[in-house]
Amino acid sequence: MNDPAVEQAVRLQLGMAHLVEQTAPAGFAPKVAVGLDVAYAQDSDRLIAAAVCVDMTTLTIVDSAVHEAVADFPYVPGLFAFRELPALLPALAKLTTSPDVLVCDGQGLAHPRGFGLACHIGVETGLPSIGVGKQALGQFEAPGPTRGDWKPLVDNGETVGRALRTQDDVKPVFVSVGHRIDLDTACDLVLKLSPRYRLPETTRAADHLGREALAGRVGVQDVRD
DNA sequence: GCGACAG
DNA sequence: ATCTTGTCGC
């Protein structure tokens, strides 16, 4: 079971993990956050990556883009980025707006090698990014029942993220630093983006757009020359 | 050694 | 991730 592609992917993560910055740029005050998500077809390896820009003040959608691709890397826990990154980067490139922060569907530092999807895409683009997972990678302690309550996600004595309650009496989400941001700021942002539902409006919007595009209800415009 | 394991 | 019926609540 020694897959050379998998071994190479692990080596790449180990070699890039040190590039992650856990400090936000001076005066960091994001105006536009972009939600990233990928929708998968059921009967083929077709997939669609969606990027939706949301205004941090009004939480309204100000821009969006999708990119269709084919899954070329299997789903392997811990190597998630190698499956979604190839489609997410082109989707990001199609945006007309320059987002200030990336909100990813998955983990950042809360990852076995400290280099989850959010870190990978952050380092690759140079943009601040945060990981928001619906499910933790490993065990965690439950935070209090109130919106805003949280408990640290610890890995070998190190805090790698937080189990954060975004709504009263609703399952928590798992927030971790992706790149160029600190955990406090990341959680702050997630709460601002989640005024009503468990998940941030950014990921909700990206998830929705991805499904619509897969169903052919919205066009998948390809810009090429 | 065995199980658990983002989407 | 994706497939699904009904059910509960605003």
Image: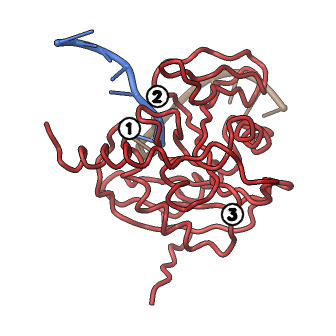
Chain colours: A red, B blue, C brown
Kindly check if marks 1 and 2 are in contact, taking CB atoms under 8 A apart as contact.
yes
Residue located 52% across and 33% down the image? A110
Q: Amino acid at mark 3?
A: Pro
Is residue A205 found left or right of B7 in the rendered image?
right
Q: Amino acid at mark 1?
A: Gly
Q: CA distance from mark 2 to mark 3?
A: 27 Å
Q: A201 or A159: which is nearer to us?
A: A159
Quadrant in the rendering for residue A166: top right
Q: CA distance from mark 3 to mark 1?
A: 26 Å
Quarter of the picture containing the N terminus of chain A is top left
Chain at numbered mark 1: A
Question: Which residue is label 1 attached to?
Answer: A78
Question: Which residue is label 3 attached to?
Answer: A99
> Where does the image place residue A205, in percent across and percent down from the top left?
65, 54
Residue located 74% across and 62% down the image? A61
Residue located 60% across and 36% down the image? A176
Chain at numbered mark 3: A
> Where does the image place residue A128, in percent across and percent down from the top left?
64, 53
Question: Which residue is label 2 attached to?
Answer: A137
Vertical relation: A150 (above or below) A41: above
- Secondary structure beneath label 1: loop
Q: Amino acid at mark 2?
A: Leu
